[in-house]
Amino acid sequence: MMKKIKGWVQRRSPRTMALFAFVLALLIVVSFSLLTDNRSHFFIASEAVHAVGIFILIFKLARKKSCAGLSLKTQELTALVIAARVYCHLEFDKDIHTVLDLATLIPTLWVIYMIRFKLKTTYLDALDKMPRYYLVVPCVVLALIFQVFPRQFRLNRIVWAFSQFLETVAVLPQLKLMQNTKMVEPFTGTYVFALGVSRFLAFVNWFVELHVPPAITVN
């Protein structure tokens, strides 16, 4: 069964797969919007667009058998962000956010596995130069500053703040790699675009949740 699915994917054109991914993301957004009454539509849309980006990467790795142009460090930082969010969801409340993050984390870990082991000969290690601690350490410091000093020490809040800060900069190694190679592979460019849209929708969700009052229902 898996071989048939893989064969079908490999015979499709990039344009067809992009259209398929868009329709899939739209169905995910509509489905989850119908299943939940909370104000998380922008978060759901953000996760759906991110899932499209991951789907594009999986298609690239499965069809081209190459991870050239992809930053392993961005994938690892993204996995760290999602894992931190999953931890916070499990501590706060187990809801649709947990399911969506787990659904994104699993394929992200698969991409990391492919780059590290199966396709490591095509990985541009020498050009993926940005050290991870350049991004992780400042995000830890910011999380501590914004969460520890104004409030009592709560690990969940610190981890959540860390994930939010790291999410905004996790794409930088990928952008640096693209700058170093001086070329943008179409699949990689589409993934980066999807990641940018996902980050924008996540910001909109944060703004709505914190700054827009809920609508008053009149019975």
Image (spheres, rainbow, N blue to C red):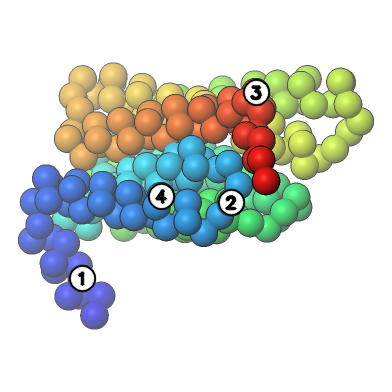
Element on which disc 4 rests: helix
Q: Quadrant of residue 200?
A: top left
Front label number (2 vs 1): 2
Give how far across and how far down residue 72 sits, in percent.
Answer: 40, 40
Neighbourhood count class around disc 4 (C-alpha, 10 Å): few under 14, some 14–19, many 20 upward? many
Residue lying at 53% horizontally and 51% vertically, measured from the top left: 101
Of labels 4 and 2, the one closer to you = 2
Q: Quadrant of the N terminus?
A: bottom left
Instruction: From the image, tell me which residue sits under label 3.
Output: 211
Tag count: 4
**Residue 160 percent location from the top left of the image:** 69, 37
Q: Mark 3 or 2 closer to N-term?
A: 2
Q: Is residue 41 visible?
A: yes
Residue depicted at x 78% and y 20%: 145
Residue on which the image places disc 4: 29
Q: Amino acid at mark 1?
A: Ile
Q: Does 149 sit above or below residue 196? A: above
Contact, mark 3 vs mark 2 (Cβ under 8 Å) = no
Q: First in sequence: mark 1 or mark 3?
A: 1
Mark 1 highlights which residue? 5
